Image (tube, rainbow, N blue to C red):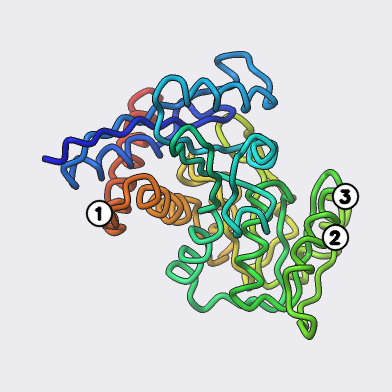
């Protein structure tokens, strides 16, 4: 057995129930590695998102190997890093931090996770006109992945229009000068005009998580000819995915992206290529167990 051990944490709001830690630990066991992964919930600790810097510093002192970083810290974390991978720097967001020789190195595995999930789960997705809900850290990764996959028009909607505009400028700046991609930005007030015409919709906001329940968009705006994706994977089937599926939309639940980004993170931390099919099967197992527990408590 490999004598190297790994200590990892997940920093964010409402992360206590996350299924990412057990996914990493199970895969590590299958790879004969010793791996401990613990959630560090800002809500439970009553800490603001700006505490991310102090938590990372404490992680160095406590011997952590790495952290995953999620809402609402993916962009805030950048200022505390010693080095940033080019992709994370370009996206302006980081979800994985490695600790190497006391230095904090940032990466972004959200983009690759979403890109692979979209290709596997919705291989025939019409990318002509896609609406993206949320311009935060996850939104930047999804926007980049959508354009990389061939999206022709991307409409970015965020409650803070200036944040949507900033993301549009960031993504546009990364495109070739002759790029034909149309990018427009707006607030939720633009949803009634844009969503009914869209060929696809992605929720990259935290709305729908157990800690942020609800719908990110009025489902009456959806239509059966569009596909709908959510990056929220807990609950495994969000209200958005449930209602979109009932309308006849092709859907992609967040667990597909969850496995993609987890596998990429696992490889960054350990240097070992994980078995993605095994991780997906394990996530399904965890989700089924969770759903059974919910039914038993009803």
Q: Which mark is residue 221?
A: none
Question: Where does the image place residue 237, in percent across and percent down from the top left?
Answer: 49, 46
The image quadrant where one finds the N terminus is: top left
For label 2, the SS is: strand
What residue appears at the point 54 percent right and 58 percent down from the top-left corner? 245
Q: Which mark is residue 161?
A: 3
Question: Where does the image place residue 190, in percent across and percent down from the top left?
Answer: 87, 57
Q: Which residue is mark 2?
A: 185
Q: Which is nearer the N-term, disc 2 or disc 1?
A: 2
For label 3, the SS is: helix
Mark 2 surroundings: few (<14), some (14-19) or many (≥20) residues within 10 A: many
| Contact, mark 2 vs mark 1 (Cβ under 8 Å) | no
Instruction: Out of 138 and 191, give the one closest to the viewer.
Output: 138
| Contact, mark 2 vs mark 3 (Cβ under 8 Å) | yes
Q: Which residue is mark 1?
A: 278
Q: Is residue 280 left or right of residue 113?
A: left
The image quadrant where one finds the C terminus is: top left
Q: Which is nearer the N-term, disc 2 or disc 3?
A: 3
Q: Is residue 189 left or right of residue 26?
A: right
Q: Is residue 242 above or below residue 44?
A: below
Q: Is residue 96 above or below residue 165?
A: above
Question: Where does the image place residue 167, in percent across and percent down from the top left?
Answer: 78, 56
Q: Which is nearer the N-term, disc 1 or disc 3?
A: 3
For label 1, the SS is: helix
What residue appears at the point 32 percent right and 36 percent down from the top-left corner? 22
Question: Where does the image place residue 67, in percent across and percent down from the top left?
Answer: 47, 35
Mark 1 surroundings: few (<14), some (14-19) or many (≥20) residues within 10 A: some
What residue appears at the point 47 percent right and 26 percent down from the top-left corner? 60
């Amino acid at each position: 057995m490999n004598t190297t051990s790994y200590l990892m944490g997940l920093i964010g709001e409402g992360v206590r129930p996350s299924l990412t830690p057990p996914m990493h630990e199970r895969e590590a066991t299958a790879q004969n590695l010793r791996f401990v992964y613990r959630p560090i919930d800002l809500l439970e600790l009553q800490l603001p998102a700006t505490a991310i810097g102090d938590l990372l510093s404490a992680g160095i002192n406590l011997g952590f190997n790495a952290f995953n970083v999620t809402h609402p810290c993916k962009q805030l974390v950048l200022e505390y890093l010693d080095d940033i991978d080019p992709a994370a720097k370009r996206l302006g967001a980081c979800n994985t931090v490695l600790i190497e020789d006391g230095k904090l190195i940032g990466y972004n595995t959200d983009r690759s996770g979403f890109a692979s999930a979209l290709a596997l789960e919705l291989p025939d997705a019409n990318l002509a006109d896609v609406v993206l809900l949320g311009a935060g850290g996850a939104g930047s990764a999804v926007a980049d992945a959508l354009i990389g996959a061939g999206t022709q028009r991307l409409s970015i909607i965020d409650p803070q229009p200036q944040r949507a505009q900033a993301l549009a400028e960031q993504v546009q700046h990364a495109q070739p000068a002759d790029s034909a991609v149309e990018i427009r930005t707006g607030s939720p007030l633009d949803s009634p005009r844009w969503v009914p015409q869209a060929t696809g919709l992605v929720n990259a906001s935290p709305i729908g998580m157990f800690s942020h329940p609800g719908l990110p968009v009025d489902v009456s705006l959806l239509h059966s000819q569009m596909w709908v994706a959510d990056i929220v994977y807990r609950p495994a089937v969000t209200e958005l995915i449930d209602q979109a599926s009932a309308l006849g939309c092709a859907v992609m639940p967040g667990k597909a992206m969850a496995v993609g980004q987890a596998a990429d993170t696992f490889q960054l931390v350990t240097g070992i290529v994980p078995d993605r099919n095994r991780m997906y099967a394990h996530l399904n197992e965890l989700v089924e167990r969770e759903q059974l527990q919910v039914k038993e408590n009803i």
